[in-house]
Amino acid sequence: MGYQTLLFEIKDAIAFITINRPDKLNALNDQVVDELAHAADRVATEGAIKGAILTGAGTKAFVAGADIGDLAKQGPFDGKARALRGQAMLRRFETCGKPVVAAVNGYALGGGCELAMACHLRIASEHARFGQPEVKLGIAPGYGGTQRLPRIVGKGNALYLILTAELIDAHEAHRIGLVNKVVPPGELLATTEQLLRSILSMGPLAVRLALEAVDQGLEMTLEEGLLLEANHFGLLAATQDMKEGLTAFLEKRAPRFAGR
């Protein structure tokens, strides 16, 4: 698939995915969503890709929201179908089994905030701004904002952002737990790549099962989640990676993980 709204580059096992509509502040129209869905499938299925970084082109926006022109034309059935397509795309990134990090370089509003939340970690430029301002347009979040936001920042903070449509800066987003780190704009991509490469130096099977346990465990009782964790712990005990990791620790050397 040739992308018209994305830049997609694989560099040393990392897929760098850039939403490339800077003149539209990288707004998510139907084509962008479809191309992101294809990119998410590539991240999930291509062995050469071990992790991904998502960012936006230009200096103003990560993704400033959905394309209002598209939304203005939708009826109830179109609206539901659009929401389901967007939700499926974000869920594909979230459950791809490989670490996905958002490098938030500017406005992350509406669908942009929802895209960032579907990534496993979020690094923000000091110039970044976050919000779910849909109610100002007479709509509500449709790409998972009402579900992921309270899971990440708590019900009270989520309701405040959704109901007031207030935008918050990167430092406030960090304070409430929406982003993991705030860095100067010139350091954003380098810091994000360094973080992801650090994660990729870990045992890949361990990372994959840790992502799965956290994702699935959020919907379980504590007892069910603990059983899932124990099962994953047992599975990893049968891997070459576990033996290599423990042996390397005892021998005081860097491990050489093979993903087996």
Image (cartoon, helix red, strand yellow):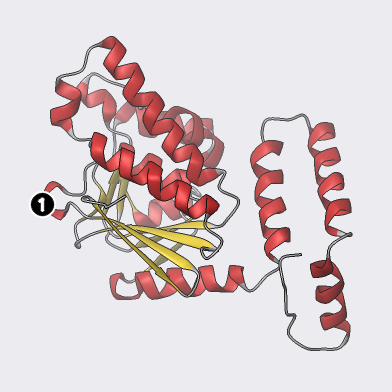
Mark 1 closeness class: few <14, some 14–19, many ≥20 residues within 10 Å? few
Q: Is residue 146 above or below residue 62?
A: above
Residue drawn at the location 13% of the way across and 46% of the way down: 24
Horizontal and vertical percent for residue 193?
45, 71
Pick the residue in front: 221 or 43. 43
Q: Is residue 223 above or below residue 171?
A: above
Q: Is residue 34 left or right of residue 69?
A: right
Residue drawn at the location 50% of the way across and 70% of the way down: 13
Q: Residue furthest front?
A: 1
Residue drawn at the location 44% of the way across and 68% of the way down: 192
Q: Is residue 185 above or below residue 163?
A: below
Location of residue 220 (image quadrant): top right
Location of residue 71 (image quadrant): top left
* Residue hosting label 1: 23
Horizontal and vertical percent for residue 248?
82, 82
- Can residue 144 be seen from the camera position used here? no
